[in-house]
Amino acid sequence: MNKKTLRDIDLKGKKVIMRVDFNVPVKEGVIKDDTRIKGALPSIKYVLEQGGSLVLMSHMGRPDEKGITADTTMKIVADYLSKLLEKPVKFVADCAAADAEVAAMKAGDIVMLENTRYHKEEQAKCKQKEGESDEDFKARKAALKEQQKELAKKLASYGDVFCNDAFGTAHRAHASTAVITKYISTSVAGFLMEKEIEYLGSAVENPVRPFVAILGGAKVSDKLAVVKNLLNKVDTLIIGGGMAYTFLKALGKKIGNSLCEEDQIEYAKEMMAKAKELGVKFLLPVDNVAADKFDPEANTQVVEEIPDGWMGLDIGPKTVALYSDAIKSAKTVVWNGPMGCFEMEKFNKGTFGVCEAVAQVKANGGISIIGGGDSVAAVNKSGQAPKMSHVSTGGGASLEFLEGKELPGVVSLNDK
């Protein structure tokens, strides 16, 4: 990674403002999964050990869409973090009004700012209102962008150094993730961010071969750019989940009532032709677990082609064996998206079977990377997470990284 990290600078006596990804699931004031909080601890502890003080900021939930609730306040995380670190974490109820608290900080102190998305200018998201003229919309958008700069400037004033350790939001050009770097001279990556970029970056740019990518999930349209980008890099591309049925229909197979994006069939044909041309193995399901309805109690059957009135909700046992063979011989594996509706017990065998095969890659001396989103939930649910080389914390960010896009939250950091 050619970006500076916390290790590259002197932190003694410095105030560090750090963007973390503490967007954790909270129900009735209780944190349900603290993976993201624990993931940021190495960076947090390092700053304190080096004699710095720390201002933490994050978003939580979608208060911009669903409104501010008792479960979107960072106070919950500040209290939780205080217990983990066994030291006080001072909470400030407005991320844009922390001057007094920050000024009073001494080495070793920690301040946690309130949810950055309580300010609409954090994201500066702007939709044209009904009946609003193009001119008025443009003016409103420009004004919001100016407000975003002001918020970024305010956040930058809290630190001598900006550290971005929130890979999960690195694909967003928000005030606290990227715009802030324009107003602070030293911007570096945290250790979690460094790990993400190293694993995902080396996998895509310089993989140890054979390189296998596994893509699942519901829709082809969500993964269009990823398929296109990875075809030029992988030796084998494996497709599962709901998106597989669009490809199977493109091959003329019967898919019954399975999920299918009719407008992507031509694209699916193009991608399969491209794979052939590039000599990339393109694997699709050879059998499926079909159900008569989308229901945990549905009747099921294992079939090669899906009869009318039935829908494919998982890959079948022959497919699990086919995919597992391809995966086990790999030296680099990247996996994004489940193989079926793994949340329902009747349809989790495909995802968990693939999970076991991916877990063996690391044991065989290879690298296995779980690229965010539902795949992470699946790997955690199957209990195989500790056997993976790297489990990404970023859903959308890891997907955009695999698409070959530059991430604003990474690009804006200082180069080494």
Image: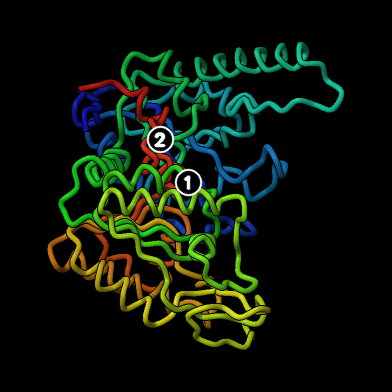
| Residue 371 falls left or right of residue 279 | right
| Residue 341 falls left or right of residue 215 | right
Above or below, comparing residue 289 to residue 173 in the picture: below
Query: Which residue is depicted at the point 19% across and 26% down?
Result: 8
**Spot occupied by residue 211 in the image (x, y as percentages of width and height):** 22, 55
Residue occupied by mark 1: 224
Viewer-nearest residue: 143 or 150: 143
At label 1, counting other C-alpha atoms closer than 10 Å, the crowd grade (few under 14, some 14-19, many 20 or more) is: some
Label 2: which secondary element: strand
Instruction: Tell me the CA gap for discs 2 and 1.
Output: 43 Å
Label 1: which secondary element: helix
Amino acid residing under circle 2: Ile
Image label count: 2
Viewer-nearest residue: 265 or 215: 265
Q: Is residue 143 visible?
A: yes
Residue occupied by mark 2: 110
**Spot occupied by residue 302 in the image (x, y as percentages of width and height):** 49, 85
**Spot occupied by residue 5 in the image (x, y as percentages of width and height):** 24, 30
Q: Quadrant of residue 408?
A: top left
Task: Quadrant for the C terminus, please.
Answer: top left
